Image: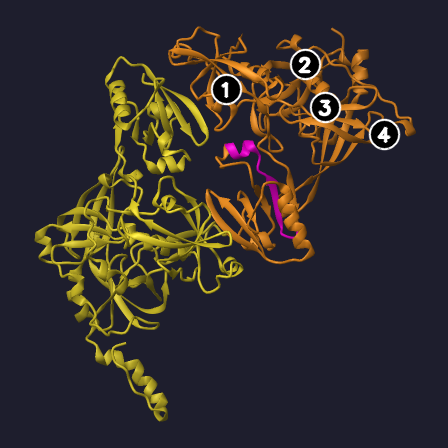
Amino acid sequence: MIRSVRISPLCFLFGAAALWLAPLRGAPALPALWAPRVKSVVAVEYYTETESDRRPTIAYGTAVDNRGTIILPSSAVDARVPPKQLQQFKVYLPGDPTGYDGTYLGQDVFTGCHYVRADPKLAAQLTPVTAWAAPAGTPAPAMADEVWGIGLRNKDEDFAPYILVSHIAIVQSLPQRTAIAQQEVAGPGLPVFNRAGFLIGIAASSFGQTYLEFSRLERAGTPVMLVDLEESSAFVLADEIVPYFGRVPQNIYGRPLAWLGAYGLEPMDREVASFLRLSAQSGAVVSEVLEDSPAEKAGMKDHDIILAIDGQPLPRFRPYRIVTDYVEREIERRKPGDVMTLTVLRGSDRVELKAPLGEEPKLIREAERKYFERLGFTVREFVYGDAVARRIKTGEASGVVISYVKPNGPAAIAGAGVEDWVKEIDGVAVKSFSEAAARLAAIEADSGRGEFVLLVSHGSDTSILRVKLR
Amino acid sequence: MRAAGVSHGFNQLLDSVVRIDVREVAFDQGTRRFEASIGSGVLLSADGLVLTNAHVVGPRAIDINITLPNLERVEAKLVGWDHWTDLALVRLDHESVRRRGLKFAHAEFGDSDKLYPGETVYAVGTPYGLTRTVTRGIISNTSRYFEDDRGVDGYETGSFNTWLQTDAAINPGNSGGPLVIEDGKVMGVTSRGYLGANNLGFAIPANTAKRIVAGLVRDGAITRSYIGIVPRDLQDLESFYSLALNTGMLIDSVDPGSPAARGGLRGGDVLLAVDGRAVDGRFPEQLPPIQNLIASHPVGSALRLTIKRGGTSFETIVTTERLESTMGEEWALEHWGLSVRKVSRAYAREHQLPDASGVLVIGVRPGFPAEVAGLLPGDVVTRINQRPVGSLEVIKSAYAAYGVKPQPTLFEAERDRRVSLYILKP
């Protein structure tokens, strides 16, 4: 709300009418606010290049500085895709079919934003969204506030910009302060403004409206669910994201990444909390403490319940399951080397642990990989997460993992599957990725080769795959 | 060739085939339910032993009623079962038979090794409750390989025996009835058919049944040795392993933590001999006899295995354990609306659980405390009120305490390696 209106009890009816009209009288017309703010938004297109295909993806971005730095929402990139497969970034101005080159910079794990740097020619045409920052003392967005944002049409319409207007229905902690509007208020990743034109948030990606469509012909048929992915009805408040715009990743993997090594955090519901006499706060159960992790070194045990971080009890959230996101964000906000003090409940004892955070071990999306066209599969390096998933000691880690199997290719016909763990090639144990890659390359290059044999393990089963090359 | 009906032996056989009505308890869905089913069986002795399938009568049976060929009904008790071979043995209530002066014939086993493909056989039983139905067919295959790790009411079957395959019509209710030749000798126990197929029926060979019957009469159960290897036929892989044909059996995988794993075996090894006795696992139907050779040793036996790995051969000693099913004992805690099954060692290995403690949730009843708290089938309950659940007794005693004084009870359970807490409230 921009201005307050004093109402005397005597003219209540008249006052109510004044309240309704007040914002309209006080603020510039929306089209006048909208036009300059459109210069803060872009559309971004990129390709995901896999062994078998190239898939385009379109996302929306917001310019955050003068250097052409653009943030995309976390959903803009599939978290499982290795960043090296993300190619050919193009940045488009709303309403303009010219695509400018962009460079993918990586994801900031704390805000979840992906960063892209646009070509300087384009950067000069952008207005950083920080230009619309609200002055100090502006009241926090609240229920019933009128809010608006920008949406972008599809590529075939040159990403033409349009306006979306709504009101705030509720503001929640999820765990970031997030406003949920009555209708769609902006494209995911695009800014949201108040009636005065100040930046109040960035539209979240997971709040598209969903609709059920029932068939008129097939009366008992299953309805089709329609999800509006191009517009969002929720936005993370500016205070939760604007101060972190500067967390531009130093590399495409977003490292350094702080690591505790408490696996499988699970929330507790209200009933459990009150049973454990924790009615005013919440807790998170640690399913497993990972081998050689900072948590293990600090003395954390499986099934400990985290109650407080640096002396601050874990807050209660609605819904209660948000507490695990809260703990994870507390880790992600820190740097390797930072000391995290954790209070845990173990049985009926409270134990204080001091954990200097480590650097996250190499992730699956960072693993080296190599595709063998003639053999019909890709193998990748066996990383820490693979050892965790297979419940083995990291010391026993060897071999490689199949990350792609070409449909109907020789490996597929032999029964190879994605996530199969290759332990032996032709009866000889695989020690490292480079060794496996070299041996497979030799098999691939040997045109006289009729077959080769893999020993693979999947779940608790091991089997012999006989791959015929002719 | 004589017509079957004329043979004295065949007439005697007809007078020894019975109908079995079973009422059994089921613990799924968070409650205790009773189910009724019908099967067939064959009388084997003058003192009233009846042979049938394990999937007809098992430990969950509450009431077993036998209808004799003369239509007299008499109660029976389970002597023992063996789901691995899908065989069970029950005994007529001796007192009732004596008091009522009931008369019955009994059948005799033939030598199933002498069967040949194309030989005429008859299946006798109670398909769909139609008593004393005789169907005719031939032996389609004398040693069919068929394994199913959930095949007998969720229990494993087929690892230690091959099956007779026949095209004699077999329908639900035939189960447990005899497969006989023209002189009435029992050559097999009809067990199962392929659903949707035409006349692909399987029976347990009489020579397997003889052994199992003797063991069940003696001990009430069949105890087998386990080393933890999953075999696979070598078929066509001999050249890759540089082996002569008909030599050795491929070890496809080794159960984690099993005696074989501790003995250093791993998938891809080839088993050449057990205690110096060469094995030949070239074809699938040769695998069950090799498995049976290992299983027949007393539990705790030290087996000397000859193994070929790559270019080298070596020997290793593996000490057998008692073979267990992945299925554990079941129970229903009705006020909680919770059905549970003890986690067995085999289940823990298969699901890569750290150990075999805990009980598996197999059913919850909507609107009852377990379901309201959020427990789901597949969860493994590890602690109750912070006490480790090492056995079914722990959960039963917590339930008994709840029965005396209902109050919130804290459950800790794992689902896909994630540990959560639940409160079961009155």
Name the mark nearer the viewer: 3 or 4: 3
- Quadrant where the image shows the C terminus of chain B: bottom right
Q: Residue A320 vs residue A46: left or right?
A: right
Determine if residue B126 is in view: no
Label for residue B72?
A: 4
Q: Residues within 10 Å of mark 4 (few under 14, many from 20)?
A: few
Name the mark nearer the viewer: 2 or 3: 3
Query: Is disc 3 placed on a helix, strand or loop?
Result: helix
| Quadrant of res B331 | top right
User: Count the marks: how many?
Assistant: 4
- Between the residue at mark 1 and the residue at mark 2, the CA separation in whole angstroms equals 23 Å
Q: Earlier in the sequence, mark 1 or mark 2?
A: 2
Q: Amino acid at mark 4?
A: Glu
Q: Colour of chain B?
A: orange
- Quadrant where the image shows the N terminus of chain B: top right
Q: Amino acid at mark 1?
A: Pro
Badge 4 and badge 2 in a common chain: yes
Name the mark nearer the viewer: 4 or 2: 2
